[in-house]
Amino acid sequence: MKAMVLAAIGRPLQLEERPDPVPGQGEIRVKVEACAVCRTDLHVVDGDLTQASLPIIPGHEIVGRVDALGAGVTTHAVGTRVGIPWLGHTCGQCSYCRAGRENLCDHPAFTGYTRDGGFATHVVADADFAFPLEEGGDPVAAAPLMCAGLIGWRSLCIAGDGHRIGLYGFGAAAHILAQVCRWQGREVYAFTRDGDEAAQALARSLGVKWAGASHEPPPEPLDTAIIFAPVGALVPLALRAVRKGGRVVCGGIHMSDIPQFSYDLLWEERELVSVANLTRRDAVEFLKLAPQMGIEMTTTVYPLERANEALEDLREGRFQGAAVLVP
């Protein structure tokens, strides 16, 4: 197999040839068709997330076909298409797992962070954390659903049933979630980096009610806001934008420091909450509904060997929607 490998924090990924991995008990091997590039991959490469199992193959928005089964696997068949997300394994025994909150598992494994991921031609995954996908779909379009889509869905569920939804940071997750919200009949307000007219144009093309810069107040108070950009300074801006009793959801795994803000922004029963990982139930629910939503995926495709370029383009905001690696 070929893989783009992170050997040390802050260094470029290196293309390596390795023996094809062998799936163990309860595992499957998947031949990768596409793997989207997530901002979390940047956090792994840059060392913002400090527990990476180096050397590591990043990538956790994986679509591919099963090409080998480990012992005891009866839930998948060779040749079927599956999606593999960030959450790669849970212990099933801790208090969180027993309470149905496996996203908070005390002893988890994460694809592309603590176990090798999808910036490769092949990947091994826990069969219980690989989800069947439609056979006729486009793997490039499906790959961003496995994190940008899933974390957006969980964020929306936590945000509640408010009608006016603000999305801060209009990247891969927000451009999917805007379409989900429109399908549900909600109004979407898109907040982008100052001067990012391309992102605002994309948002408007997807039917948002309003698009503007992050520092601008929306034309109406929001019921809830979801922050995808890893910028702590957006928290007080979002709190200021939501109505009394509104909720602000931080949808990223890493964020810069939140600046000090006055208590009046939180008063009147506004809430500030975070989203951590996802559960298998989230994946089953979202992937069942996704084909009905008519989601139009905006993607930029890179060959596997150009993974470093894709990461840098993501860092600099050089494309709209999602970057996807294709081996």
Image (cartoon, helix red, strand yellow):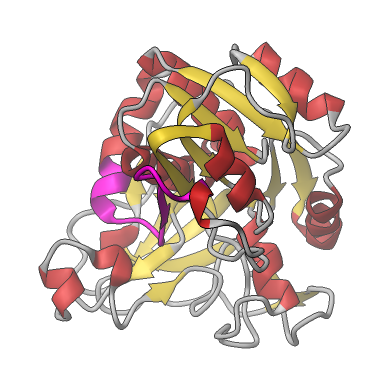
Residue drawn at x 84%, y 74% is 12
Q: Is residue 147 placed above or below 107 in the rendered structure?
A: above
Q: Reply above or below: 25 against 150.
A: below
Say if the magenta span includes residue 271: yes
- Counting from the top left corner in percent of width and height, residue 125 is at 40, 67
| Residue 299 falls left or right of residue 92 | right
Residue at the spot x=32%, y=60% of the render?
A: 129
Apparent side of residue 312 relative to residue 45 in the rendered image (left or right): right
Q: Which quadrant of the structure image shows residue 160?
A: top left
For the point 65% across and 49% down, the residue is 234
Point out the residue furthest to the left here: 98
Q: Choose top left, top right, bottom left or bottom right for residue 67.
A: bottom left
Q: Position of residue 157 (x, y in %)?
A: 32, 39
- Residue visible at 63% across and 88% down? 54
Give the residues in magenta: 265-284
Relative horizontal placement of residue 164, taking residue 210 as reference (left or right):
left
Residue 187 appears in the figure? yes
Q: Horizontally, is 115 left or right of 134 in the view?
A: right
